[in-house]
């Protein structure tokens, strides 16, 4: 017994001493600003990729989205590229209508990120700098504030901090004005704080892209071909709307109706090509993602110098400030959303949609050398953002941490209910006042920003005509001198109306009055 007791005591002391003498974990060689507290083990990315088929199918079933394509890049290679669903819901779901990794989609706001990459190339080529004032190459362009006109740079416009209001110029393009006409009219818009406010403006990005193109003595779409698409072998990618319409394997735009998603007309995206006019495939975008993750290199060749690209991929402005000390702010680079995940890993990407019927998103985690891109042919869908967020959860944690589809659905619902100048399910007053004789409202009304508006009388009542295309809509009596109309726009929900109010000398169109520019005089 004494021998056993002595042996036990010896082992206990040995264990204690062994524990005391064990060395601490090795210190990391990773710089603190790049260190993550959670490792990504070998095989984690492969495991995440293995779940994409099921996640994509589930999202499509839940949303009804007709078609989707997905690609994942890891270690410099495209490790997953696949299509789901159909290109056109008005056709049978046969092989000729199936989406694959080479189906061409309109990519919406991803165009801004692609364009920022083109700008970075030109910065590296010393054609321009991020801090080049746009007025140096566009002497005909001006903002409403002379100081901003003189000092606004390419960086300011790609960081969306020029002060232009949200969606500045978009309604002009919907009315049929071309790019130059829209940009000339922007000088009439009131500005927010210069360099301290973030507003999503496609035509702001377009201004910067035009300056870069002039500096290169090329059209913007040609510059994109020459410095990005061809060097990367992106053979199905273009910044020209006509090229998209000529593709045989293209995904038609779809909008949601009471009968599900149905094809809609493709709006011409050329006026704001640099911000929303690119069409591409997930296979092509995989090459671009691989280049971004390799700091501008692709297959041993430098496409964009890293020191010119890095400013675009790192924080330059605040989109939305944190709502509490423990929350993270939403940040933006030059044409890229940027931020930090809960594992302290940096991430960049972008997302957006075309109201005519497409949505897209991509995200990349450079410390894990992985990125994902998702394209769909349906408007106002949370699917691309949900799938990218789910994939990043799986890469970082090995499991889903949030109900991303629900979170993005709620966010999209909040934004879809916030269109200025529109009312849904509206009914006129029960005791509406009668109108004046209809002929008293007819005539031409003038507005420097929107152009002339014509009101004519027909056998069915009044009609309103606007824009260079002379789009015509019916005016329906509401109350007294107020009528309603439904704007011709893909962004207007079914059943929504806006008010047109007459006075003896003027006509106010509520839908076009969001920047207090909606009064037309006669």
Image: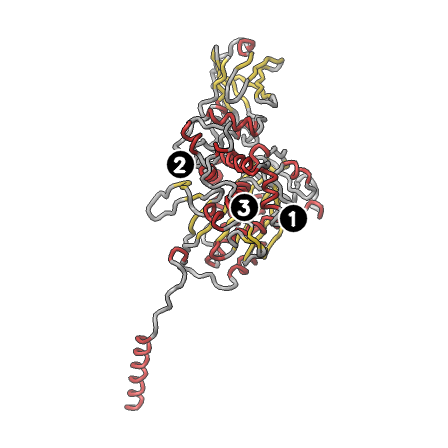
Whether the residues at callouts 3 and 2 have beta carbons within 8 Å, the answer is no
What is the crowding at mark 1: few (fewer than 14 residues within 10 Å), some, or many (at least 20)? some
Quadrant placement of the N terminus: bottom left
Which numbered disc flags the more N-terminal residue, 3 or 2? 2
Q: Element under label 1?
A: loop
Q: How are the colours assigned in the image?
A: secondary structure
Residue that label 3 marks: 384
Residue that label 1 marks: 102
What is the crowding at mark 3: few (fewer than 14 residues within 10 Å), some, or many (at least 20)? many
Residue 209 position within the rendered picture, expressed as x and y whole percent measured from the top left: 53, 37
Q: Residue at x 60, y 21 (%)?
A: 472
Residue 382 appears in the picture as rendered: no
Q: Residue at x 43, y 52 (%)?
A: 341
Viewer-nearest residue: 201 or 512: 201
User: Which label sits in the foreground, 2 or 1?
Assistant: 2
User: Which label sits in the foreground, 3 or 2?
Assistant: 2
Viewer-nearest residue: 185 or 259: 185
Which numbered disc flags the more N-terminal residue, 3 or 1? 1
Q: Residue at x 54, y 57 (%)?
A: 74
Viewer-nearest residue: 506 or 203: 203
Q: Element under label 2?
A: loop
Residue 267 position within the rendered picture, expressed as x and y whole percent measured from the top left: 61, 33
Which numbered disc flags the more N-terminal residue, 2 or 1? 1
What is the crowding at mark 2: few (fewer than 14 residues within 10 Å), some, or many (at least 20)? some
Residue that label 2 marks: 195
User: How many marks are shown on the rendered structure?
Assistant: 3
The vertical placement of 360 against 81, above or below, is above
**Disc number placed over residue 207 in the picture, else none:** none
Work out how far the residue at label 3 is from the one at label 1, CA to CA, in angstroms.
17 Å
Residue 264 position within the rendered picture, expressed as x and y whole percent measured from the top left: 62, 34
């Amino acid at each position: 017994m004494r021998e056993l007791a002595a042996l036990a005591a010896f082992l206990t002391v040995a264990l204690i001493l062994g524990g005391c003498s064990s060395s601490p974990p090795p210190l990391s060689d990773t710089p603190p600003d790049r260190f993550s507290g959670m490792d990504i083990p070998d095989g984690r990315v492969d495991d995440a990729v293995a779940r994409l088929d099921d996640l994509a199918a589930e999202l499509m079933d839940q949303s009804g989205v007709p078609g989707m394509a997905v690609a994942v890049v890891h270690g410099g290679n495209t490790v997953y590229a696949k299509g789901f669903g159909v290109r056109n819901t008005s056709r049978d779901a046969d092989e000729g209508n199936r989406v694959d990794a080479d189906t061409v989609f309109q990519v919406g706001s991803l165009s801004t990120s692609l364009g920022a990459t083109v700008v970075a190339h030109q910065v590296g080529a010393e054609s321009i700098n991020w801090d080049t004032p746009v007025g140096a190459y566009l002497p005909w362009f001006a903002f409403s504030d002379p100081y901003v006109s003189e000092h606004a740079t390419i960086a300011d416009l790609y960081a969306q901090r020029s002060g232009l209001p949200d969606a500045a110029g978009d309604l002009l393009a919907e009315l049929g004005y071309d790019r130059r006409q829209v940009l000339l009219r922007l000088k009439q818009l009131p500005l927010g704080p210069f360099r301290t406010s973030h507003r999503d403006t496609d035509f702001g990005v377009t201004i910067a892209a035009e300056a870069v193109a002039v500096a290169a003595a090329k059209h913007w779409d040609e510059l994109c071909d020459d410095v990005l698409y061809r060097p990367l072998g992106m053979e199905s990618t273009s910044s020209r709307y006509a090229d998209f319409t000529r593709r045989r394997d293209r995904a038609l735009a779809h909008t949601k109706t009471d009968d599900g998603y149905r094809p809609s007309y493709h709006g011409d995206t050329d006026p704001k090509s640099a911000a929303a006019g690119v069409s591409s495939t997930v296979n092509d975008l995989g090459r671009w993602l691989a280049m971004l993750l390799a700091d501008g290199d692709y297959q041993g060749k430098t496409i964009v110098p890293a020191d010119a690209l890095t400013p675009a991929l790192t924080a330059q402005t605040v989109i939305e400030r944190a709502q509490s000390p423990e929350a993270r702010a939403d940040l933006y680079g030059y044409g890229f959303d940027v931020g930090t995940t809960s594992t302290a890993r940096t991430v960049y990407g972008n997302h957006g949609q075309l109201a005519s019927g497409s949505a897209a998103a991509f995200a990349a985690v450079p410390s894990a050398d992985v990125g994902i891109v998702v394209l769909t042919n349906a408007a106002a869908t949370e699917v691309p953002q949900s799938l990218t967020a789910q994939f990043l959860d799986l890469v970082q944690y090995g499991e889903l941490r949030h109900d991303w589809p629900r979170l993005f659905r709620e966010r999209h619902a909040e934004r879809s209910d916030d269109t200025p100048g529109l009312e849904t399910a509206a009914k006129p007053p029960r005791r509406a006042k009668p109108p004046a004789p209809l002929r008293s409202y007819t005539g031409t009304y003038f507005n420097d920003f929107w152009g002339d508006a014509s009101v004519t009388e027909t056998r069915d009542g009044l009609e309103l005509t606007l824009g260079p295309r002379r789009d015509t809509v019916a005016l329906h009596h509401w109350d007294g001198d107020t009528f309603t109309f439904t704007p011709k726009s893909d962004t207007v929900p079914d059943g929504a109306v806006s008010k047109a109010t007459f006075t003896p000398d003027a006509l106010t169109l509520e839908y076009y009055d969001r920047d207090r520019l909606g009064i037309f005089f006669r």
